[in-house]
Every structure is written in structure tokens, then in C-alpha cells.
Amino acid sequence: MATAPGKSFRKGLTILELTEMFPTEESAREWFESIIWANGRHCPHCGCTDTFENPKSEPSRPYRCKGCHQHFSVRLGTILEGSPLPFRKWVLAIYLHMTSLKGVSSMKLHRDIGVTQKTAWFMLQRIREAFKRDDDDNDPMGGPVEMDETWVGGRRKNMHRAERKKREGRGPVDMTAVVGAKDRTANEVRAKVVHSTDAATLVPFIERNAAHGATVYTDDAAAYSSLATMLNGFIHESVNHSAGEYVREMASTNGIESFWAVLKRAHKGVYHKFSVKHLQRYVTDFAGRHNVRTRDTIGQMEFIVAGMVGKRLTYAALKADNGLPSGARTQAT
């Protein structure tokens, strides 16, 4: 089928093509090396480029540095560090995760690549880690920017009676707040778990993520009523959802709400539960995969591998990490 003029064409990758690309463990290792060491092989210990392949070394550490005399592999200093799994299994895990619009569950992954469910869960959390970026690394979005908040989590009516008794108050007290912004021009989404949805929380978020002078579209939630006075240098327009208004000329929040829809369908249909402890990891993952979805499949996979550098994640650190802003409202974990 011909591609419509002006539309980008994303080249997919079948499982058969994937297996032909990576017929051996060596071919998979060389692929990781070509991305992680795109500017040439270097020692992760000291950064020295004077290295050599030592046939007498252990297979897990095939290279040696002439500077610090230490052995190393391409796994060192990346998310793969400490993982005994073959590179081909990592290739398959990345492929399956990136080609599933709503993500892949650890139960499915463990069956598909032949690892335990615990290992599959840990692999997926490490892959999600590749999407993490510091706020300082993100340039402000030029806009127009749509901004909205949502609540993610289980419902009290679905909880065990003993758990329901612990929940008090009205509204989404059993859920966790997430705020998001979408740049219409760049089609980029950024989202963050927050402790509140008041103006004091939402205004700093948009100030960090929207460029000075950008147009910001929101709904008519009470927290946004003061944005016009609090957002200096921004143009603010809102649509009145409570009156059934969802689009008024260019003003709408349909784009960011579509992102929420995908996240929640994944929550209900694939994962069935996002623990509050790891909710930010899932939110970052869905935003990251949305932002690279126009790339070819192999390009998406390469993006993940490039993002693995400098982000080692141990199982102990993963289990201990809170992952939430201070005082965040939570559901049962």
C-alpha cells in the first residue's frame, strides 16, 4: 500500500527478520557493541581507548585495557551489567517490548524467551530504565502544549473488604496522581507522578517543560484557574469539559488524553496493576515509547540500547527504590 504524501513511513521488523539479523550470540554482542561503543571501544573503568581482545580472558570479560590493565565487556557500566543472560535474549526482550503498543507482561516474556517470571520482570524494569532522563536534560517544549492530569490505580470497590476499610475520604483517595504535557508540534509527551494536582504543583511542571511564550491548553479544572496569572510569559487557553466543551478552535487536550487512554488500557489489559512503588517507571516507559514510535523498529531498539549506558540497575536497588515524590497519594501495593 502506498504511503500518503507527507506521512512518515515506519519500517517494521518481523520475528523472522530479527532471527536472521541475529543468528548467533556473537552477532548480538557485536550489535550491542556497535551502539554502546559507537565512537570506538573504550574501557568502562578508566575511559582509555587503548584496549585489546584477550583470548585468554573469561568469555564474560573478553577485553583488556592497557591503561588500567582491567578486563571488561560491553555490559560493564550499562543496564546489562551483572546479567548472565545471553545477548540474544536481551535482543528479543527489547524487540517484544518495543513492538507491543501497550507493553508486554513479565508472564508473557518469561514464556517467550525462556526465563523465569522474576527474571523477565527485572529485564523489563531495566529496559524501562533506558528511557529515564534528568529534568535538566530536557529542553523546554516549544508548543503548543497540552497539559492534563489523571489518576492511576485500582478502585476501592475491587479491593478486599479489609483493605477498603483502610481507605477513607471521597474522590480518588485510592489512586495516584500523574501530570502530563504533550507538545503538538514535536508530538512529544512528558509525564510525572506527583504528590498533588493543585496549582502549586502543576505550575512548576509546565514552567520546566514548556518554552517561554508557548501556548498552553488545559481543561477547566480548578487548579488551572490561576494559571493565567501564575504563568508569566505563557498564553493559556482552556476548554470547559464540565459544560461538554472538548474542542474550541485550537484549544483542546485531546492529545494528552489519548496518551492517558493507552496507559490505562495497558494497566487494565496487560499489567492489571501498577504498584505505586514503580508507577513512575511505567509512566516514563509509555512516554518514552510514544516519543520514538515514528522510528523504524530497529531504530527504536537502538535507542533503548544507547540509553542503557551509565544506568546500571541492581535488583536490590530496584526493590528498595521508592520512585515517588514525597507525600504522593497512593493505592495499595
Image (cartoon, rainbow, N blue to C red):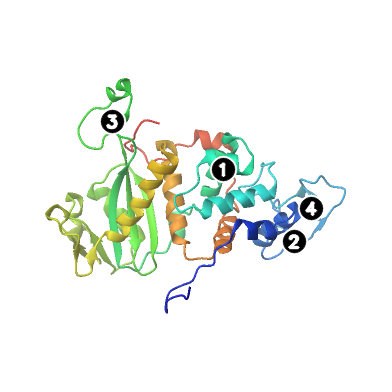
Q: Which of the pair 179/249 is nearer the observer?
A: 249
Residue furthest bottom as drawn = 5
Left of 290 or right of it: where is 169? Answer: left
> Which residue corresponds to mark 3?
156
Label 1, secondary structure: give it: helix
Query: In the rendered structure, which disc, 4 or 2, sits on the residue that comes first in sequence?
Result: 2
Q: Residue at x 27, y 30 (%)?
A: 157
**Where in the figure is residue 298, as x and y percent of width and height?**
58, 62
Q: Amino acid at mark 4?
A: Tyr
Q: Position of residue 138 (x, y in %)?
A: 44, 60
Q: Residue at x 73, y 50 (%)?
A: 73
Q: Nearer the viewer, residue 6 or 57?
A: 6
In the rendered structure, which disc, 1 or 4, sits on the residue that comes first in sequence? 4
Kind of residue at badge 1 = Leu
Residue at label 4? 63
Report the Cα–Cα distance between label 4 and label 3.
Answer: 55 Å
Q: Residues within 10 Å of mark 2 (few under 14, many from 20)?
A: some
Q: Which residue is mark 1?
A: 109
Q: Which residue is mark 2?
A: 49
Q: Quadrant of residue 51?
A: bottom right
Q: Residues within 10 Å of mark 4 (few under 14, many from 20)?
A: many
Foreground mark, 1 or 3?
A: 1
Q: Residue at x 29, y 47 (%)?
A: 150
**Mark 3 or mark 2: whose residue is earlier in sequence:** 2
